[in-house]
Image (cartoon, helix red, strand yellow):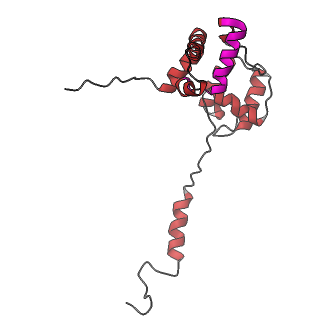
Amino acid sequence: MAKERLKVTVAAEEIAGQLRRDEKFSQGVRLYAVYQIALGKKAEELQSVYNTSHKTICNWVHRFNAHGVDGLKERPRRGRPSRLGREEKAQLKQVVLSSPEEEGFSSGTWTWALVSEYIRRTFCVSYKKAQIYNILHSIGLSYQKGKGFFPEAEERVEAVSAIKKTSGTKRRQCGVV
């Protein structure tokens, strides 16, 4: 009888996210990549193993040569810090998952303009349209276009079919009955 294959119950993306969050692990992975380069492997061979470009691996080697193991630590990322903190983003997520009517808006669905207005009212921060989408993405939400449902559409189909000149029967084609 064959051995049962190992299965992981968590999605690979979630595991990769946890690995990226652990700074010591990331530093260890980089150090091991540098070690493999020292053993004679090429960066091009390692890029699929480490799921990164060969240029990034080369950068790790150069940083290791210049600063030692400390050169492989995570460096601060660029970019302006968010004007909304974690708690505020968590609150925003809860609000967006509920109905806009609960927040005093006269709409059944959230739009970027409503989200922007809610943020402006609640947190005294204003954002442009593109940034609203970025914020929603950062809290695990995405823009979804609503599909309209029109109950009168069925009545219209019935009315149109009653008015049509042709019936549902087959017509003669090219003299063939």
Q: Quadrant of residue 84?
A: top right
The residue that appears at 80% across and 22% down in the rendered structure is: 124
Location of the N terminus (image quadrant)? top left
The image shows residue 39, relative to residue 2, as above or below, that is above
Dominant SS of magenta comes to helix
Q: Is residue 41 above or below residue 156?
A: above
The residue closer to the viewer here, 42 or 167, is: 42
| In front of the other: 5 or 51 | 51
Quarter of the image that includes the C terminus: bottom left
Q: Is residue 86 left or right of residue 128?
A: left
Numbered circles on residues, count? 0
Q: Is residue 97 magenta?
A: no
Q: Is residue 19 left or right of residue 61?
A: left
Q: Is residue 63 magenta?
A: yes
Image location (x, y in percent) of residue 12: 48, 26
Residue 70 placement (x, y as % from top left):
68, 6
The picture places residue 81, in percent across and down from the top left corner, at 76, 19
Q: Do we see residue 104 in this rendering?
A: no
Highlighted range, magenta: 50-68
Viewer-closest of 6 and 163? 6
Task: Tell me where residue 61 sits by quadrant.
Answer: top right
Which residue sits furthest bottom? 175
Q: Residue at the location (56% across, 18% down)? A: 40
Residue ID at (67%, 11%): 64
Q: Is residue 27 visible?
A: yes
- Nearer to the camera, 23 or 97: 23
Q: Is residue 28 above or below residue 158?
A: above
x and y percent of residue 83 in the render?
77, 20
Report the residue that reaches farthest toward the front: 40
